[in-house]
Image (tube, helix red, strand yellow):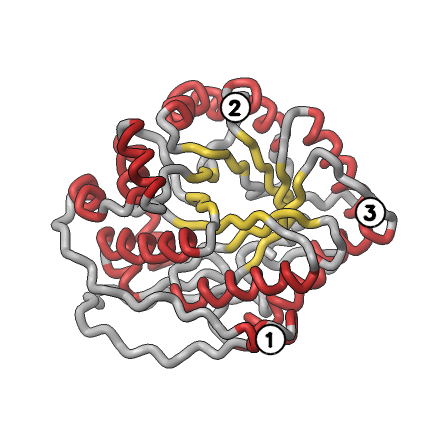
Amino acid sequence: LTSSRRVSLLQRGAMASCRLELMGLYDNAAYRRHARGLLQKAKAQGVLSGLNIPNKKPGEPLLEWAATLCQEIPSCEVTVHYSLKHQRSGTDPAEAFLRWCEEAMSVGVKRVLLVTGPRGPRQDAVWVLQRLAARQVRLDGLRLGVAFNACLPTDTERETERQRLVQKLQTGLVRDVWLNTGVDEELLGEGLTYLEALQKELGFSLQTFASAMLPSEAQLVQMRERPWNGVQFSEEFLSSLSGMGRATGKALAVFRQHKVEPIIESKVRTPDDLSKLEALLAGNHERLNSLLGEDYCQPSPSKDAKAPSMEAVSAGAKGRFTRPQQAATDDVPRSFAPPRRRWEKARGREV
């Protein structure tokens, strides 16, 4: 996209940039190569607003990778994920996390996302935050974030997730909230409206981010056959690459409405991937489908996500939303087996 085109998109409220979660990079050399290549290009083109390093397994040199990114792209903000599941050290988890945060700041990390992880320890993210708050710990210079899954499938699970979010925010340490991947427009809208009301009730503001995916054959197959814990996608999303793009575009529209910054949880490795990402962020479905090698079909109008009334959210954590019954869509192909869902006990993929 040209500079004038990006300005035009911003004026119309379309997204021109996003954060990228760096998927499938396993050593420092790979991070350096990627930073010197496509990531620098994406930053120069105005597509990239920040980078996230996920914590997928024990023993990963997360801060070494973060230091490399900060050196190679100093103008790009780096967020590192800290999974209590993968960072077990045999010592006090809160003390270990605090020491790690201090080291993270020393290498240039600006934000940390604290998560428990699926089947994580009993001393979870809520426990760690409450323990740090009791010690009156301050993390000046570092923005601490937590995960929130707005698209869990039942009222009970969503209520439990909201109660956990309230507990995290009440510690006074949290400044960012990161929404798990989801494409249910109504649940996303409800969750974000709840979060906005909760900020007013607690008397402070947060920065909100939300996950989305760039359409790709590999990730589409993965979500059909081996979906992430706590993640549920629509029939439209799972039907085809173009359906994946349409459903993601609708989720991005909800993010725009609520001034939420997207983070893309997909591999973006080639110039072709970057072009697809630009088309997705710009809402150019015809261009995106052309790059995906699929015919363009004008998406059917979708109703706006219904925001719950302020009366429904005025009770803060006690507010409960009921998802309206949705009509079946007959125009979505169903040539694949329904994916198996692997739900944790009232938890999302990252909690």
Q: Nearer the viewer, residue 163 or 220?
A: 163
Quadrant where the C terminus is found in the figure: bottom right
Q: CA distance from mark 3 to mark 2?
A: 35 Å
Most distant residue in the front direction:
11
Q: Which residue is tagged 1?
A: 319
**Left or right side of 281 for 89:** right
Q: Estimate the x, y position of residue 233 in percent, counting from the top left.
A: 37, 62
**Left or right side of 157 for 252:** left
**Dot 2 lies on which element?**
loop
Residue type highlighted by circle 2: Ser
Q: Which residue is tagged 3?
A: 92
Q: Which residue is tagged 2?
A: 75
Q: Nearer the viewer, mark 3 or mark 2?
A: 2
| Upstream in sequence: badge 1 or badge 2 | 2
Q: Quadrant of residue 161?
A: bottom right
**Dot 3 lies on which element?**
loop
Q: Nearer the viewer, residue 114 or 192?
A: 192
CB of mark 3 within 8 Å of CB of mark 2? no
- Neighbor class of circle 2 (other Cα within 10 Å; few <14, some 14-19, many 20+) is few
| Upstream in sequence: badge 3 or badge 2 | 2
Residue 83 seen:
no
Please tell me whether residue 191 is drawn above or below residue 115 in the rendered image. Answer: below
Q: Estimate the x, y position of residue 54 in percent, counting from the top left.
A: 54, 41
| Upstream in sequence: badge 1 or badge 3 | 3
Label annotation for residue 22: none
Quadrant where the N terminus is found in the figure: top left
Residue drawn 62% across the image and 63% down it: 198
Residue drawn 17% across the image and 46% down it: 286
Residue 171 seen:
yes
